Image (tube, grey):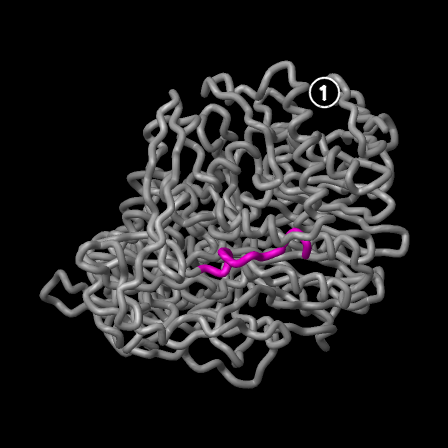
Amino acid sequence: MPVLLVFLAFGPKLTLPQTPYGRAEVRFDRWGIPHIFAENPLALSYAQGYVTALQRLFQMDFTRRKAEGRLAEWLGEGAVEGDFEVRKVGLHLAARKMLEALSLEVLNLLEAYAKGVNEAAKQMAELPPEYQRLGAKFSPWKPLDSVALIKGIAWMLSSSVEEEASIYLALLKMGLARLLDLVRAEPTDPISIVDSSQLAPPPGLEPRSIPEGAGGLMREVLSEVARGWLRARGRTLGSNNFAIAPWRTEEGLPIVANDPHLGLSAPPVWHLVHLHCPQFKLWGATIPGVPGVIIGTNGRIAWAVTSTGFDVCDLYTFRTSRAGRAYIYKGQEVPFKVRTEKILVKGGRVVERKVLETHLGPVVAKFGALVASVRWVGHEPTKEVDAFLGLYKARDVFEAERALRDFACPPQNFVVADLKGNIFFRANGLLPLRKGTPFLPMNGETGEFEWEGFIPWEELPQVLNPRSGIVVTANNRPQRSPKHYLAFSFDIGFRARRLWELLDVPWRLTVGYVKSVQCDVYSKLAQRLLPFLIKSAMRRAGELGPLERRAIKALKEWNGFCLPDSTGSTVFHAWLRFALRGAFLDELPEDLGVKFVGFANVSVRALISAFEGRTKFDWLDDKRTARREGPEDLAISTLKEAVRWLSSRLGPNPKEWTWGRLCKVRALHPLFEDFSYKASPAPGGLFTVSPGGFSVFGEDFSFSAGASVRLIIQLGPEGPKVWFSLPGGQSGLPHSKHFSDLLPTWLRGDYFYLEGGKAKDNGRITGLSPGMPEGWRTFPRKRSFCSHLSPLLEEVG
């Protein structure tokens, strides 16, 4: 039967395809969101592939090439090394394993999706403009490409290769005791997802597992990783999700919310879609190239995800034989497995590279007579797409839990609610059991520290219907006393604490209130650090000049919200940047110091511990001077540095040091700057619920990572209600009116309402909700969280 694609008033005019799957109808709303109605799942998947290609073809193509190591076909010789690093890790091989493990039902859906993509590309009068600029063509989409996308995302969210190598090099510089005092396992705020009465013991240490003399090898690991396209980002970013039980809400209906914090790009990471067939109905968001939805609802359940931060990747070292053709394992020389990767380069040249493999996994670096080999859960034949299909069909949280047994990598915190009133949390994934010191590279030669199976699925952190009626995850520690080693450290804890403060309140929660919670930009970090800075300034007021006094006055009057018109946010974050540099850059070699300070989740918790006197060693003394400095010295000297920097950058009047002049969101196109979104002032700060994830070493405080989509779902007997906010637009075509039309709403902290029914009123399904609160502008503003210091501050201000 034909698949009929109906494009409403502003839809593209293309020749309609014919397929054997059945009838499908596609209707676009005023924001370019496709609503697809089909008579069976295969027709639905075909139509989704077709429509996604219409809107995001280049993005899909570019992303699959990154994951498969095929960008040199477009970009030429300069991309060969990046391609080779991706090939070396073997994501394309992991994708093949996954494809072989998937059910026939899922394989058929992936095949239908691929056919839809290819038909859309075939029907286009011309390909998107990036192809013209590159002089490139589109090669047919395959089911393997969709799976490779998933593996690429999994690697970025769960690889710890770079982290382990960096920690090892820091260990060589400072020794184990100083390292563990600086790189602290416990979060600054100990809040956990599942309540527990006891704090977890620190991760076990087994010095015998730590290889000796591997500094050169680890530096080579970092050099090799830096060449690849897929740098691990899971531990530098974060996400929020929460589920609210019906008895905690005004309407007596469950609510699920999600805002994954990923890279902000043009077009956005996510593509919104409404899918409908007799077998299931879906509303939500997916990654272009992946059929179905990744976060969303089927009308009976709703689910949301955040990254767990679990340690599922280990780096092992081996000595090699004299000839270099084998590695030493249990006293024997074991030949390397060798595979050849052929990289096609633009212009037709083929580059061949050899990849060595041990029995644990690929060799990612070689230095002298040592090699580093990676074992990663994602190399197992996992079945995440089967898990999602199970969620699409699930009727309650219990069936959802069974579906999640197939979800292995990347490990994710799932929160689920159902129409029956249940809410559920599960930290899901395949987690290895092993001895040794897994957060550092381990000696692979003895075999003693290899994986010994996986943590039983039933023993992973979970909770059903907690007494609070709320479950919150923000990459924070899942349990205070886990039975098994899960990870060395988790998020610092400020977002999770703030979410609990806002949600665990004595009144019933509304969707409008939840919108404001999701867009909150109050700084728990500033609340923790500013009292020390301000008291230091009061005690040493005589050392401050007029500008420093005015800066302290701005901090005293600041209410703690990181809004574009705030001057307090500017002064605080500028001071924090110089304080981090001043505290730690003298402790490590320059390259490692920059890496450590730039990893804010670790460096900020170390700074707080040092200021609060909870460290065993003196980190705040500047080793480059003869004088011994203390916490107040660092606070005051770095305040002066920050003020000098601000006055040179923004002028001599602190009233003009508004946060929006420095803190801007930059959503970039992966190749062409003129296709990027215009940089815009944005609310948010370090570790706020809605974050501004800037670099400590940037020229300003602009950020290119944050809430990649905001989604709020309310389940009800008449169907789900879905609100969303997207940092860009549905289309990836720069000339389209849907390329960036949703960005202003995202910047304001506003939402759109996605209706669940068929298109009405000439296809306009979506619109601004009447009486909608304006996100971050809705919370009442406290005068200052430092107001109790005001009388004393007068002598400084």
Identity of the residue drawn at 40% across and 77% down: 435
Judge by depth and name the residue closer to the eye, 84 or 596.
84
Q: Quadrant of residue 2?
A: top right
Counting from the top left corner in percent of width and height, residue 391 is at: 73, 56
Q: Is residue 143 above or below residue 787?
A: above
Can I make out residue 653 in this image? no
Residue shown at 68%/57% (left/top)? 387
Residue nearest the observer in this picture, 124 or 497: 124
Query: Could you tell whether 745 is left or right of 478 in the image?
Result: right
Tell me which segment is drawn in magenta: 376-387
Q: Indicate the quadrant containing the N terminus: top left, top right, bottom left or bottom right.
A: top right
What residue is pinned by disc 1? 12
On the picture, is 581 further left or further right than 671?
A: left
Is residue 681 part of the magenta span, yes or no? no
| 310 or 90: nearer the viewer | 90
Q: In the picture provided, is 538 more to the left or to the right than 691?
A: left
Q: Amino acid at mark 1?
A: Pro
